[in-house]
Image: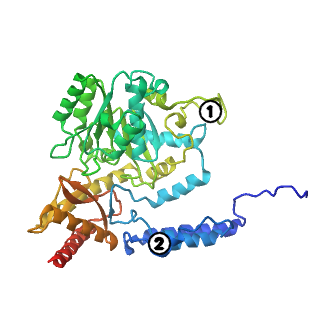
Amino acid sequence: MPQNEFVEENLDPQDWESFRTLAHQMIDDTIDYLQTLRQRPVWKPIPEDAAEFMSQPAPRRPEGEAQTYADFKEYVLANPMGNIHPRFWGWVMGNGIPYAALSDMLAAAINPNMGGGEHIANYVERQVIDWCKEMTGFPADASGILVSGGSMANFVGLAVMRNAMAGYDIRAEGMAAAKQPMTIYASKETHSSNYKAIEQLGLGKNWMRLLPVNERYQIDIAELEKAIAADKAAGYKPICIVGHAGTVNTGATDDLNTLADICEREGMWFHVDGAFGALAALPEGTRELVSGLERADSLGFDLHKWMYMPMEVACVLIRNFEDHIKTFAVSPEYLSHMPRGLAGGKHAWFGDLGLQLSRNFRALKVWMTVKAYGLDKFAHIIEQNVKQARYLAELVEQSPELELLAPVELNIVCFRFVAPGMDDEALNTLNKEIMLQLHERGLAVPSYTSLNGKFALRVAITNHRSTRADFDFLAEKVLELAHAEVRALS
């Protein structure tokens, strides 16, 4: 062999049978871990040795597959975020399905690029998008794409809105060519991803009207009508209303049918942020709560929240395919479609329907899990979560020491501990301490918000593993911790 000949290598296992044994061990350990979740704390502070271990430089020499897996078990698996635990209700997070996790492994193993082309994985994604239309009542001929999460779903929907409503070729001429400022409307309860999208799309947050809400935390329709009229009188161009199916703080749903009526009358775009609440359309018992979302011009929602899929997967649906593809399609020679072969096919490429060209096979876990369990199973558990929220609200209302801070419209319960003689400032400090101790002791993970200046323990129930007993436990521990804190203060 010539001395200068390069030694060719690859990254497949050197010993496939040893690798097979290790892979089986990984799966067995994972199943054991999931099966025994209740035996562990929901969350715990990261130990110093684990944090220190994660500060090491990148290894130049192999440490080996078995040793690396041992390090994973010791430092990573032992210190989870906790959102897979039955008593995790923080923010709005799903907690994963074991079968879907295995589906994700299969997707990573075959590893297709979902940017486009004529291969079966793209057919899987198109079928999942069709199922998403079916679940939400969207028209069968609507467009859509799977994205990483609700933030990107809102970005894509609002990008299509901007381009469709601008009235000129905004892709070529940019925002500088706009003849008048364009205004967008949402309630002050809107998720930050919506005004982040408005900022990044060049529309400017100052032109997004964040309007008051009523006692149910829905957008105030009278104030919305006034704002639109005032902007038109000032020479501005109202282009979009963002409605919500499940707001982030309280789970409120705007009056979507009225918002759709206003958009039709004013010639505006109707975008619905349904990050988790849109899937209330699936169970018959909760469908009416989100009536009107099917009238949206664009609708974004997560499947890794209230459909319990492993992260990351969300969907954005666009009523008009032409509006969608005109916003993102590009046609350089190296991406041109062919009449046959892998670069052929009769369908639009997903790379022309969103920002990403390189895309992972996130559709497979949805496709396999829906086929395995059926939509009725998901509908039942979504409705179960709503009933659990109402059960927790009843526990709060039955206790003279607990106070419900917002109506329970869907699956979010905001409450606090109250004690005689304590003002709101003192109660805010006390309830924050209760929440921190719930976390640090590994008892439960609610998150938090502020409603009318009151610190709220916020329980968002998108957890298929929770039972009523978990909410009994939460109420009991809140009171127990609160009493201990009050005694310490007296």
Q: Earlier in the sequence, mark 2 or mark 1?
A: 2
Q: Quadrant of the N terminus?
A: bottom right
Q: Position of residue 398 (x, y in %)?
A: 12, 65
Find residue 145 and report its horizontal and vertical position in percent.
46, 39
Residue 214 shown left or right of residue 71 in the figure: left
Expressed as whole percent of the image width and height from the top left, the position of residue 99 reads 48, 59
Judging depth in this view, the residue of 87 and 233 nearest the camera is: 233
Q: Quadrant of residue 459?
A: bottom left
Residue at 33% over, 23% down:
180
Furthest residue toward left: 421
- From the image, which quarter does the C terminus lie in? bottom left
Q: Separation of disc 2 and disc 1 at Cα?
A: 45 Å
Q: Which residue is mark 1?
A: 335
Marking on residue 228 = none
Q: Nearer the viewer, residue 313 or 291?
A: 313
The residue at which mark 2 appears reads as 78
Above/below status of 359 relative to 449: above
Q: Residue furthest right?
A: 2
Residue under the image location 61 percent in, 64 percent down: 58
Q: Position of residue 49 (x, y in %)?
A: 49, 75
Q: Quadrant of residue 222?
A: top left
The answer to whether residue 132 shows anywhere in this view is no
